[in-house]
Amino acid sequence: MDFNDTSEEAGFREEAAAWLAENAPSDEAFRALSPLEQAKQWQKCKYDAGWACIGWAPEFGGRGASPIEEVIWRQEESRYDLPASFFLIGQGMIGPTLMAWASDEDKARYLPPLASGEEVWCQLFSEPAGGSDLAALRTRAERDGEDWVINGQKIWTSGAHYSDYGVIVVRTDPTVAKHKGLSYFYVDMKAPGVEIKPIKQLTGDSDFNEVYFTDVRVSDSQRLGEVGQGWQVSLTTLMNERAAIGSSFGQMDVSLALSVAQELEIDGHPALEDAAVRTKIANWYVQESGLKYTGYRSLTALSRGDLPGPENSIGKLVGAPKMQAMASYLMDLLGASGAIADEALATKAGIIQRAYMGAPGLRIAGGTDEIMANIIAERVLGLPQEPRLDKGIPFNEVPTG
Amino acid sequence: MNFEFSEEQQLLREQARGFLTEHCPTSVVRAVLDSDDDWDASLWKKVAEMGWTATVIPEAYGGLGLSYYELAILAEEMGRSAAPLPFSSSIYLASEAICYFGNERQKSEWLPKLASGECVATVAMAERPGRLVLDQLETRRTDSGITGHKVPVADASVADVAVVLTRSDQGLEACLVPLNQTGVSIAPVLTLDASRGHSAVTFDGASGQPLGDAPLDPADWERVIDGAAVLFAWEQLGVAESALIQARDYALQRFAFGRAIGSYQAIKHKLANAYVKNTLARSNAYYGVWALAEGSDELPLAAATARVAAIQASTYAAEENIQTHGGMGFTWEFDCQFYYRRAKLLSLAIGSEAVWQDRLVSALTEQTVAA
């Protein structure tokens, strides 16, 4: 075993690193732009040089790179402080869906500007009545000639306010069973009747939106998949979600915990000498190191041209609760001052407090801890699904709360 | 990135699994547990014929000179089958200590016999309850021989020789002590896991020579224990996997309230947790065997991480396997007990969880300073 690149990989890494060194912007004019403007400018720069969405086919703006090359590219790009998150959902989840389900004409029209960052896409799936039970969504689309008319509400939509297009799954037939009455469209986020309201989170930030649809007209040509096939199309999007939801848990790692435990004292001794503190740090390191080397095992599979095994499904389920537990414990060590979130006064500039406040969101987004555990139990261990009271019943007869 | 076993090594895994499935089904473990036997001698003979006992011993001493990657694979399969064999005592610990510290004569005398499986060796470390403290050992070596009491000593009743941790006027020593001599008395001790014999060993003027004819640097002894910890971790991982598979299979076939108990989230989440712990343990065990096989400076951290992860995974899986089985899991008749016993037994040998958590943080601090 070794951690080295193959010679082809090393060559690719060198090429990528050289291009980044030459082209990654760091000048003041660039830093003066808003994060979205920075992201768009950098994405276009990459696109023009053939370094955007490198795993995509050349006709869609990519360079047909292999999965391991995509990883190497991400590793090299992440050495620079460049904004990327604006395009994750569009390029990571929606691009592959368009490739699988859109007409050739639509692929040619929409994929290149998605790759170049000139058009931003969002995903309109969750609803107030459908989170973990996504297929319970109620937003309706009714046929009207060559058009469909959409009415309803979506929620938790990241980036809706700066998106040009969105993909939406809606109910087109409430008289059949839950999963069978859905259809999938793309919509113009600037169309009349689309109203976007930011959600203020408990952190005080607004990363998500509610999106209301009132008599929004979309052409039948904007449908992906057959009428009633919306669930299958949605699964294509969701299967790519892991790539899009960050597996990084920020700066909240064991090295931060070590540093806090070295600086603080318990009864006149560094907290790091305390047996209880050492136990905690050891357990977090086991998790952190376990995830790191699980990632290396997956990379090895990619490097060999194989599909990674199911082991990567544990990432968010381990990482998000760990982040919450670490932040909580480090604040405990700080005592009353652990409550200080003011960056100017807080130990470690408030990283710990921000992590604690952000962690509940990470434990929910993209599949709650409980749903992730169900997925592991069902898809990896092969345990049966729980009986479902709404199975086979027309959607409009399913009990609701 | 090449963080995976080679194809030849994967093939070895398949062979080992096939061999142990055939020759060490749980009925073999049960037979030892139900009898006064301390091991399955005929299984040991077969395992030795396969060359497993010779894996990492150098060719110059009758071994195969293979790498720790191969030995880790065998260790996992030993754990998976809960084999009633002194593999960890003789191979991960005693042979390694002799290789590491022994002089030419000691290595030539013992390693070929340990490689062929004709002899079995063990190590005698613990003397009393609590953590092992190397500079407080009471077993002494003087001109009139070795005197002291070691308990529990794994596999002593089936071993020909023991590496005994002692102190002399010069300091810490690891003495090579043939067990079949008048100065050594061995009394059986019942432990959690009677499918592996344990003993109290009393040395009363026993003859034995220090390995390498010299005192040990305690740090070097810890290096050998680090190596053993990686191999123990692989064996524990095998135990953890068997326990999870047994729980999963039972959850699929056992019905309550009209459906398989595996369809209840209470069971699913328990088993998903076990899968998560096993996956963390496996990836950390990869890190451990990489550091051991490549002679990396990261071995202390990698070994401690692998060991803590394996202790946590194996005890959780074994405990929750019984819980998933309900009352039947608590019976002598069911096999759940084998993994429960073995997981805890292996977790207590060579330092328990808190010891390794402590070592992990020390190694982490040192590595951070060095970097």
Image (cartoon, coloured by chain):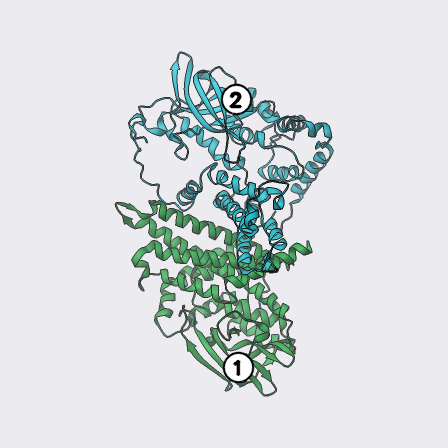
Dot 1 amino acid type:
Gly
What secondary structure is found at the residue carrying circle 1? strand
Whether pointer 2 and pointer 1 mark residues with C-beta atoms closer than 8 Å, the reply is no
**Residue B287's spot in the image, x, y percent?**
57, 54
Q: Determine whether, in the image, residue B3 is placed left or right of residue A195.
A: right
**Residue at coordinates 67% horizontally, 44% vertically from top-left?**
A7
Count the marks: 2
> Chain ID for label 2?
A
In the rendered view, would you say B217 is above or below B236? below
Instruction: Give amino acid for label 2.
Output: Tyr
Q: Colour of chain B?
A: green
Residues indicated by labels 2 and 1 sit on the same polypeptide chain:
no
Q: Is residue B74 visible?
A: no
Q: Mark 2, residues whose alpha carbon is within 10 Å: few (<14), some, or many (≥20)?
A: many
Of helix, strand and loop, which one carries label 2? strand
Is residue B217 in sight in this rendering?
yes
- Residue B293, compared with residue A220, is above or below; it is below
Which residue is labeled 1 in the image?
B148
Q: Which residue is mark 2?
A: A165
Distance from label 2 to label 1 (Cα)? Answer: 80 Å
**Rendered image quadrant of residue B187:** bottom left
Chain coloured cyan here: A
The front one of B2 and B231 is B231
Q: Chain of mark 1?
A: B
Q: Quadrant of residue B215?
A: bottom right
Task: Please state the horizontal and vertical placement of residue B24, each as a whole percent of the image.
Answer: 40, 63
Please state the horizontal and vertical placement of residue A58, each as a whole percent of the image.
Answer: 61, 27
Q: Residue furthest top?
A: A145
